[in-house]
Image (cartoon, helix red, strand yellow):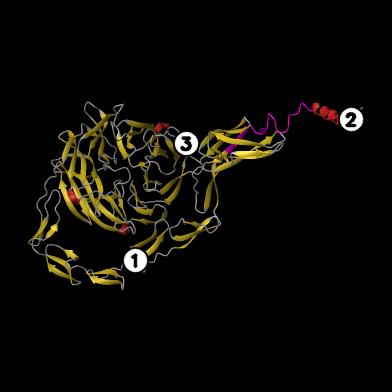
Amino acid sequence: MLRSCPWFLLLVALVLAGGCRRDEPPVGGTREDFRVEQQVLDFGRVLEGDTARRSVTVSGTGRASVTVSASVRGGPFTLATTEVSVPGAGSASLEVLFSAENGSAEGSLVLSSGGRTQEVALSGEGVRPLPCRPSVPCRQSHFELEPGVCVESVAPDGTACIPESRCQENGRCESGVCVGSPRSCDDDNPCTRDACSPDQGCVTAPVACPAPTNPCRAGVCERERGCTEVDVRDSTVCGKVDCVTARLCFSGTCQEVPTPEGSLCAPATPCQGAGLCRGGTCVRPEPEELVPAFSQELGGQPSSEPGGPVLLSHGEALFASVCGGDAGCRLVSYTSNGFLRFEMPYPDGEARALLAVSDAGVVLHEPGGLASHALTGTGTSLWRVPLGGLEPPPGAGSLVPSVGAGRIALGLEGEVVSLVSWAPPDAGEALGATLVVLAPDGGVLRSGAVEGFAGDSRVALDSSGEVFLFSPGGSLARAEPEDGGVGFRTVPLLAEVPESGASLAVAGERLFAGTRAFVDTDGGLPVTVGRDSGVDGGQPLDAPALLLDDTGYAFAREEEGLVLRAIDARGGAVRWETAVLPERSGVLHEASLVQGGAVSTVTSVLRGGETRAHVQVFAEGQRLMMCPLRGTPRVAGATYVGRFVYIALERSGTWWLEAFDLGALVTTETRGWPQGAGVSGSRRARP
């Protein structure tokens, strides 16, 4: 029967085969059409503004291909395509983009197909690059994402650059160095001297034509002809002028002509009218007493050290240390027009002496130490430094430290440089010295022994902060920080300055030591002042010594009285000399540089049992002004500010601060020494 029905057997086989595969799904019909390999896609750190790309792998889980839709939620993430076709039993990549912003970002990648959804977490960090600038020319600087810093490299050769020297131009990088071609500064003008400064570039100065031997001719430079001579203006003085004859220029020749009656022969001063020529002589009215612009009672006697300041000025403020009255000893300050700013009593009631003033405060010498008070407010104490707490020089043992006027200098940042001398308790000869630098808050920045600068030695700072030391009759040196240490080493500039006083001035890169020697601050050949330079003798005063440009001014006491000398710093010769006080008993209280190459003084002298005080002005060896103060005051000291001189004086048992307007004739010079040295007040000279 079976053999007769082959089709039946085939049907049974097909049924059996189908029954054995009932557990497999039909083709194209699956519950899991795809899967994603990653659960998290992290982009890491990416520079802000850059776009990073990462791929997600989607695998097909069925035999037939499947289409997967894609989208993103949150964060700066996007897709290259929103749909991907995944082959059956195969895989496909889906690209995700991260547009980095500053900071961390998170989002999700959503994949969907056939009602099934799967998510992939997205994350990344946007990093804002640091601003990178090369440290020197011919270097490139760029930001490295890892480790997050600027990295420099050598710029390619030929890169344009700006040479460090302004005397080069058209710079190009060569092996990491900016190389330029020399800059031409020739302006094709024979009347200018052309040069190049590495800091300023091209600089020019007018040609100084030689001075003609004829005083009525002047050397001038003309572009077409160069240096030539022309007549000076008629009536130009070419020789001696008095009230009889005058040598004046006319048409290029010096002629002697009669001086007209009534000609001006002396300028007016604050206390005396102008002098006029009358009958061949200069006739001037008698000087009158100076009238103070204000008088303010000080409330006590000023306290000071010999040679130290009695008054200090800073800006519009005046300072004095006084003792007396119910308030005891105190620091007082006044405005420039006489109003009291503050009174600060000293805590122990003992006297203090002014030393110097700067923006950082007023420095005073107190018993056993140094102190600083504020310039403003109530003048409160800023710091105190006991001298006994400083490190003594080697072998000092039981020596006692001391400091005083001329041994304090103030730095540019308010630091205090002090030359401390060490001597036996019985005030014998000083046996050692320590140079100390104090911070503006009183802390010790540097301290060390300096051999050969004890006793009356002086310390001074130049405009760059260099420290100089001078021992009267001894050596002059520059003090430099000790290599690798906290002390100092001294660099000798002069081994000895004989017959010198205790003074040291520095201005314009030049030192004036003991009124007997000039030397540049960087060393070099000294210029000495001796008898062969026009100095006949006399004992130089310790202070004040004045220095401006190429002229030093020194006072000396001779048999006939006190004299003032103007000395050429370039050759050592005395340019001019004049008598300041005819009596040896006179006292020089203060001296100041005055604009126009003049010097003004405050002096007093005992005559006929009475003390008379004067304000004087000298220039070119002539006394231009001698104005008496009212009555018979006892002067303690003074200071010059602008066109005023402020004087501390006593009248009838009461101490006053008086101000005198000296007019246009006397305007205090703001340059030179000691104007820029912090010791802007007076130095009371010994009789």
Q: Which residues are magenta?
A: 21-44
Q: Amino acid at mark 2?
A: Cys
Q: Which residue is mark 3?
A: 395
Q: Are marks 2 and 1 in contact (CB under 8 Å)?
A: no
Q: Residues within 10 Å of mark 1 (few under 14, many from 20)?
A: some
Q: Nearer the viewer, residue 29 or 130?
A: 29
Q: Is residue 210 magenta?
A: no
The mark tally for this picture is: 3
Residue type beneath disc 1 = Thr
Q: Separation of disc 2 and disc 3 at Cα?
A: 138 Å
- Residue at point 53% right, 51% down? 140
Q: x and y percent of residue 680 in the render?
A: 29, 43
User: In the rendered structure, does residue 30 fall within the stretch colored magenta?
Assistant: yes
| Residue ID for mark 1 | 192
485 shown above or below 234: above
Residue 127 seen in render: yes
Q: Secondary structure at mark 3?
A: loop
Q: Nearer the viewer, residue 76 or 14?
A: 14
The amino acid marked with disc number 3 is Gly
Residue 462 at x, y = what percent? 37, 48
- Give the residue at mark 2: 5
**Residue 99 image position (x, y, % from top left):** 54, 40
- Quadrant of residue 321 within the rendered picture: top left
Asked if residue 232 lies left or right of residue 123, the reply is left
Of tags 3 and 1, the one toward the viewer is 1
Q: Neighbour class for label 3 at 10 Å: few (<14), some, many (≥20)?
A: few
Return the x and y of residue 249 as percentages of the image width and height: 18, 69
